Structure formats: structure tokens, C-alpha cells
Image (cartoon, rainbow, N blue to C red):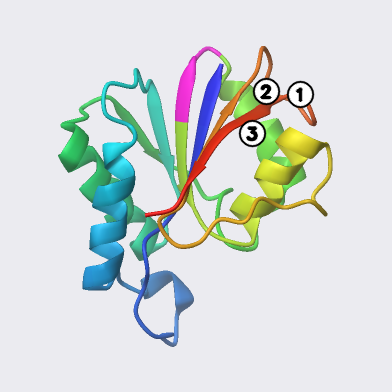
Amino acid sequence: MKLWLLRHGEAGPYQPKDAERQLTPQGIWEARQSAQHLCNQPINAVLVSPYARAQQTAQHLCSVLTYQGTVETVDWITPESSAEEALQHLEAYTSYEHILLVTHQPFVGELGGLLVHGNRQEALPLKTGSLAELEGAVLARGLMHLRSLRHP
């Protein structure tokens, strides 16, 4: 199984509602650059945070890839989400072999650390637009291997 973790592209200044922050031109570029690393990958499902910047990142990515498969907005991959709870939610997607999450820090770094190292304290260092590729026989704490970590 492969799991790609994509942190959204650079977003504009803080808004009264953090969820409404939009991508900047740099953020659009970052999303499109990260998409290049996913060309020819057999992605089965794209799971996206409901926040505007993650939604926009996913839209640009899907456009570059001409991806027309499953895209689902899920509320358990927001910045404040729990990596432990996300693992429980991801069990519902184990029938998919190749999953992409479009999400945020600190959540995405903690989830990556939990999957690779078995704990959240060794978080993966994802900058805006960064893409981590994890692979393993099962999607479980400490049992995934970090295959690559790319920054735009």
C-alpha cells in the first residue's frame, strides 16, 4: 500500500476564519509542482481537508494529473486533527492501494511520524507543498516506510 501525504500550498495571511484562507500564486505553483511527482502513479483516492487552501491544492493537483477518480472531503485531516483518530478513519480506506491525503501541519507531520516512527514526536518536516511518499504492507503505526520526501 502507498500513502502520499501532501501539505497544501502556501496560503495567504490569516483570516478571521482560518478555514477560509486561500492559496497565494506561490501556493498554486507549489501544488502544481507537487503534482508532477505524482504523474503516472495509480492513485485510487484523494482525501482532502475541507479548508479552502487544501481544496484548492487538490483542485490544481487533479487538474495537472487529469485525475477523475475518487475525491472525498473529510473533516478528520484538518490542522488540529488527531493522528491517532486519523489512523482509525483510514481503516475504512484499506481497500484502496494508493491514497493521497491533502492536508495541513501540524497534523500531517504528526501522522507521518506516527506511521513511520511509531510516534508523533518524530514528525515529518513538511513545508507548504511538500509531498511524502509512504509505503508498507499495512497502514499501521510504525509499519510504513518513508520512500521519498519532496519539497517544491
Q: Measure the C-alpha gap from mark 3 to mark 1.
A: 17 Å
Q: Is residue 26 magenta?
A: no
Tell me the quarter of the picture where residue 70 sits.
top left
How far across and down, in percent of the image, does residue 103 sit? 49, 52
**Could you say which disc has been placed on residue 127 in the image?**
none
Badge 3 marks a residue whose secondary structure is helix
Residue assigned mark 2: 139
Q: Which residues are magenta?
A: 95-99
Badge 2 marks a residue whose secondary structure is loop
Q: Are marks 2 and 1 in contact (CB under 8 Å)?
A: yes
Return the residue nearer the eye: 99 or 89: 99
Q: Quadrant of the N terminus?
A: top right
Tell me if residue 87 comes above or below residue 136 in the rendering: below
Q: Residue at x 33, y 36 (%)?
A: 37
How far across and down, in percent of the image, does residue 137 sit? 67, 12
The amino acid on which the numbered mark 2 sits, given as a three-letter code, is: Leu
Residue assigned mark 3: 89
The amino acid on which the numbered mark 3 sits, given as a three-letter code, is: His
Q: Judge depth for marks 2 and 1 and give the one in front.
A: 1
Classified by dominant secondary structure, the portion drawn in magenta counts as: loop
**Residue 19 at least partly seen:** yes
Left or right of residue 140: residue 5: left
Q: Are marks 3 and 2 in contact (CB under 8 Å)?
A: no
Return the residue nearer the eye: 116 or 43: 116
Q: Residue at x 58, y 48 (%)?
A: 76
Return the residue nearer the eye: 23 or 149: 149
Q: Judge depth for marks 3 and 1 and give the one in front.
A: 1
